[in-house]
Amino acid sequence: MAKVRLWGSLRQAADGRTEVEVEARTFKELLDRLAATYPGLEPQIRRGVSLSLDGVIYREAWFTEIRPDAEVVLMPYMTGG
C-alpha cells in the first residue's frame, strides 16, 4: 500500500487529508483508486496532476511503477515559465 501526500488544493478535495493510503502498483491505478475513494479529487485528476515519486516528477506516466515504500506526492499540474 502506498502512502500518498496530497499537495495544495488536492487536500481540500480529499476531505482535508494531507496523506492517504492507496493500494496501487502504477500511476494510473493510483489515480483511478483516488478518484473512486475521494470523488472530490476526480475533477482535478481529469484536469491533470503530477506525481513526485522518490523526488522525480512525472506527468502522464501512466504505467510508472509505484513501490509500497516509495515517497509519493500528488500535486496539481505546475505551469509557468
Image: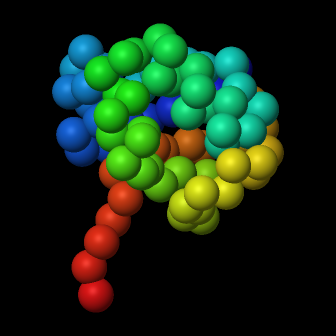
Residue 19 at what x, y percent from top left?
41, 26
Please name the residue shown 47% across and 12% down the image: 37
Q: Is residue 31 left or right of residue 77?
A: right
Lateral position of residue 80 relative to residue 70, left or right: left
Identify the coloring: rainbow
Reply above or below: 58 against 6.
below
Q: Is residue 38 something that shows in the picture?
A: yes
Query: Residue 30's spot in the image, x, y percent?
Result: 61, 31
Q: Seen in the image, is 81 located left or right of residue 39?
A: left
Residue in the image at 69% along x and 49% along y: 62
Can you tell which quarter of the image residue 45 is in?
top left
Q: Quadrant of the N terminus?
A: top right
Residue 80 position (above or below residue 63):
below
Residue drawn where x is 23% and y is 20% of the image: 16
Give the residue furthest to the bottom: 81
* Residue 9 position in % (x across, y down): 22, 40
In the image, is residue 21 above or below residue 77? Answer: above
Q: Nearer the viewer, residue 7 or 34?
A: 34
* Nearer to us in this view, 75 or 70: 75
Q: How many marks?
A: 0
Give the image quarter of residue 28: top right
Quarter of the figure with the C terminus: bottom left
Q: Give the side of residue 23 with respect to residue 51, left or right.
A: right
Residue 48 is situated, as x and y percent measured from the top left of the image, at 42, 51
Visible in this render: residue 55?
Answer: no
